[in-house]
Amino acid sequence: MNIKLSLTLRFLILVAMLLASFSLVVYENYSRYRQDDYYERLRDRSETIARHIIHITDPNLLDKVIERENVVKPMSNHRVSVYSISGFFLGDSNRIAKLPYPNIIDDIREKNYVELSIKETYYTGFVMIHNGQKFIVICSGTDFVGAQKLNFLGRLILVSLFIALIITAVLGWFFARQALNPISKVITEVDQITANNLDLRLPFGKQNDEIGALNKTFNKMLDRLEASFLMQKNFVSNASHEFITPITAIKAQIEVMLMQERSKEEYINTLNSIDEDIDHFIQLISSLGELASANVNNFDNKLNKVPLIEIIAESRAELIKGKPNYKIKLHIENLPEQEHKNYVPGNAALLKSAFKNVMENACKFSPDFTCDVSMIFVQPNIIVTISDNGIGIKEKELKLIFEPFYRANDTRGIGGYGIGLSLVKKIIDLHKGAIQVESVPSKGTKVVIKLPHAKSENTSPIVY
């Protein structure tokens, strides 16, 4: 069932319940009013005839009085019986007494007034005082006119209810269609967006209504999808290029060696060169794996309380061990007394990878292979600054340095794949931190990383 039909049916059911309830109230109230009115007219007419029954002994004269009353106040099957207060029968308008049930006289004497209906005949009995004496009057009649009016009202209500529901269904379908028409347009426009035209956007329409909000949400989602597709496209393109380069170099060296027989020294030199190319290839694959891990939206790894000083010290030691010509100076300021402020909620392996990448870049692009690392503990963050006196980065290139595989023009002669800073940015973002790069060409670069320290009440591993 589509939404238009569902809304129409719900609206129709709601209106039907309201109209049915209203109609039932009208019908019941009119039925009660008709009944009360008939009892009142029946009693009023019966009192007049009862007085004549008490005084007139001539049956013919009583018939004339009753006939005159029927002309003045017509009433179908009207009948009046009069009894003394003790229950002695005094007379009847039809000369034959007929009681609705045997004990009615006792009930009237006790309650002073009784009314009831049996099938379509209405009965009422009451105590009448005439010339200082009490009499019991029992009368009956059939309200054919009232019944016809009530039946007519019932039929009129049913027909009106049926017509009203048909009109409601038509109007409900029309308004549901009008209300959902903007959504139909959104569906049509969204259906036209494919991977080849992700630059298309939905019109906002009315800014303050739900459709405008829906279009804004769709457009934001399309922005994210377009950025993801573009990143994936660039990633695949750049990764393919980076994979081909070492493989091509290896293939070229092998082909050259196969052209003719070589000496043992030439074979050894070529194999050493191929071994270096394979090492670079493995390093590239490892870097791509780390970048893919850092791009995962659901960061499932548990973030424990990690001592940042030890992370940076280990990163420095491992880097110097692999590159003995690197010089990394470490400075620590404002070391807090509270132990928890020396820790950050993080993943040790990822944080070590991030700091190793930044320190390696700082040393690699410095002429003396030197960088300075300083740690400052400032509430509520730990600020780590890595600075060098290298070639620097041009201002127009600063905004691109976190893109995967991007390398500034000045760095083409220096080894690398352009993955490091992209990986660092992802890792710092996952740790709810911030990274900022300041650089002056030919003077050096400064990378500032801010990480929130662990809370004192967090005694268990911190999970994000």
Image: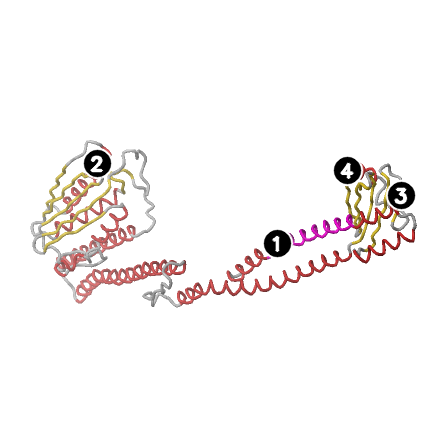
Q: Which of marks 4 and 1 is in front?
A: 4
Say which element carries label 2.
helix
What is the three-letter code of the residue carrying label 2? Answer: Asn
Kindly report the distance in space between the C-alpha atoms of the residues bearing marks 4 and 3. 21 Å
Q: Along the horizontal axis of the image, is 273 left or right of 51?
A: left
What is the three-letter code of the residue carrying label 3? Answer: Leu
Q: Which of marks 3 and 1 is in front?
A: 3
Q: Earlier in the sequence, mark 2 or mark 3?
A: 3
User: Mark 1 sits on what residue?
Assistant: 22
Q: How crowded is mark 1: few (under 14 residues within 10 Å), some or many (20 or more)?
A: few
The spot of residue 100 in percent (x, y) is 84, 45
Find residue 435 and name its label: none
Kindly report the distance in space between the C-alpha atoms of the residues bearing marks 2 and 4. 95 Å
Q: How crowded is mark 4: few (under 14 residues within 10 Å), some or many (20 or more)?
A: few
The spot of residue 140 in percent (x, y) is 81, 49
Specify the segment rendered in magenta: 16-44
User: Mark 3 sits on what residue?
Assistant: 90
What secondary structure predominates along the stretch shown in magenta?
Answer: helix
Q: Earlier in the sequence, mark 3 or mark 1?
A: 1
What is the three-letter code of the residue carrying label 4? Answer: Lys
The spot of residue 18 in percent (x, y) is 59, 54
Kindly report the distance in space between the C-alpha atoms of the residues bearing marks 3 and 1. 48 Å
Q: Which of these two is toward me, 168 or 196?
A: 168
Q: Which of marks 2 and 4 is nearer the N terminus?
A: 4
Q: Which of these two is toward me, 87 or 104?
A: 87
Say which element carries label 4.
helix
User: Mark 2 sits on what residue?
Assistant: 342
User: Mark 4 sits on what residue?
Assistant: 111
What is the three-letter code of the residue carrying label 1? Answer: Phe
Q: Earlier in the sequence, mark 4 or mark 1?
A: 1
Q: In the figure, residue 262 lies in which quadrant?
A: bottom left
